[in-house]
Image (cartoon, helix red, strand yellow):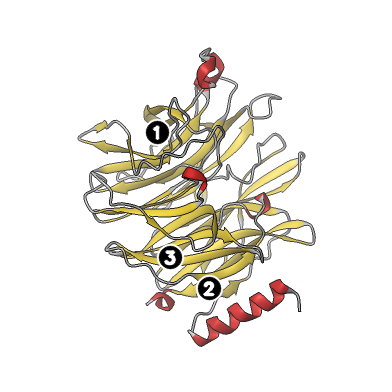
Amino acid sequence: MNKRILLLFVILASCSKNDFLVEEVQFAFGENNAQPNLVSNGDNLTLSWISSVEDTHADLFYSEYINNKWSVPASIASGSDWFVNWADFPAHAVNENLILTSYLKKSDTGTYNYDIFLNLETLSGKIKKNFLLNTDGIKAEHGFVSMIPSNNKGFFITWLDGRNTVNNTNETHHKAMTIRFAEITNIGDIINEVELDATTCDCCQTSIAKTSEGPIVVYRNRSENEIRDIYISRFRDNIWEKPIAVHNDGWEINGCPVNGPKVVVNSSNIAVAWFTAAEGKPKVNISFSTSNATDFKPPIQLNDLDALGRVDVAFLNPNEVLVSYMELDAAGTYLKIKKVSIDGKVSEAKTIAIIDEGRNTGVPQLEIMKENVFLVWTNVVKGKNQLKTVKLNSKSFY
């Protein structure tokens, strides 16, 4: 018997013994679907993605999970000059009846010269269409967007910005990327834009969340000595504080690992999950703060096998989170979940699926809505990209 088939049989048998059932949610909306972004506010679940034909056309779609199925997709935007990439996927956020979405559009023929475009709308119509987030006018890389609803019916948004890479002549530091933050009002105005860090890793995903004191942004930093650890920037008392390390892994790497962190908040409790390969040891780590990100506890390693990262995290309850991540051994690559508590208790891993380790899989997405845990990633079916959606009951983790 094929090793992968035998392993899958063992996993499913084990799952049934422990009442751990992974149920597929049908996703049947054409072919060439990828770059998913899954979002939950606890009461609703939404999904955006790109359907594309390579180098010719791309469409951004949006769907809501209603009555145990995905609604018929709404078309947000389309174009023939987009930048479509497995790691730099579109973001979206929902604030009451408003939906903010993003996509990337090439600014010239340069491979990595592209801009961030936004659409603000309700389900019944557009408010502001296809407007530019980065208004610097520089032909450079702008992307890796994260966004969440703000307190005033608008949105907080953060992104990696390459405007300084063109003019930076300091060749000893390879023209650093920056990370920026802004607010989008409920009519689509861009306000309170600010640079958070002048030197970041080039192409790791960003993450943003909201505490009782204001937004926080988590990202991969880059030092002059090419140390690329995870940092956090906090908005407090109407100012952005100087970024600090979540933990000093000391990962020295001369290129971007394309493997960003994820931050989530529940009351004053904060969890940050990330990938590192400091000292040549690949790890998926998680660290908690119980003080609104004033400081973080020592990290907890989650992977049991060789880690690939591509993490996501969600609060199961005020004191426990679920973390999804990818790891591999000689037999295959796995999408796994563990439950972790603030006091350091870690559950055994649950295997969600055997998946491809390549770029086509993208960055698997994890969200919790009510009593269900949802995951979405990209499969290749008969040579075509297609989204795979599964759910399981949160009680499986108790």
Q: Nearer the viewer, residue 49 or 340?
A: 340
* Label placed on residue 140: none
Residue 34 in sight from this viewpoint: yes
Check disc 1 and report the residue beneath it: 181
Q: Which of 3 and 116 is in front in this view?
A: 3
Residue that appears at 60% across and 36% down: 104
Q: Which amino acid does label 1 sit on?
A: Phe
Residue at far front of view:
279
Earlier-in-chain disc, 1 versus 2: 2
Q: Residue 192 location, x and y as percent? A: 34, 29
Q: Do the residues labelled 3 and 2 touch (CB within 8 Å)?
A: no
Q: Residue 11 location, x and y as percent? A: 59, 78
Q: Which of 326 and 126 is in front in this view?
A: 326
Q: Is mark 3 on a helix, strand or loop?
A: strand
* Label placed on residue 368: 3
Q: Is mark 2 on a helix, strand or loop?
A: loop
Residue 69 in sight from this viewpoint: no
Q: Is mark 1 on a helix, strand or loop?
A: strand
With respect to residue 282, does 242 lie above or below?
above
Check disc 2 and report the residue beneath it: 68
Q: Which amino acid does label 3 sit on?
A: Ile
Q: CA separation, marks 3 and 2?
A: 14 Å
Residue that appears at 41% across and 73% down: 371
When asked about the image quadrant of residue 42, the answer is: bottom left
Residue that appears at 30% across and 46% down: 151
Mark nearer the viewer, 3 or 2: 3
Earlier-in-chain disc, 3 versus 2: 2
Mark nearer the viewer, 1 or 2: 1
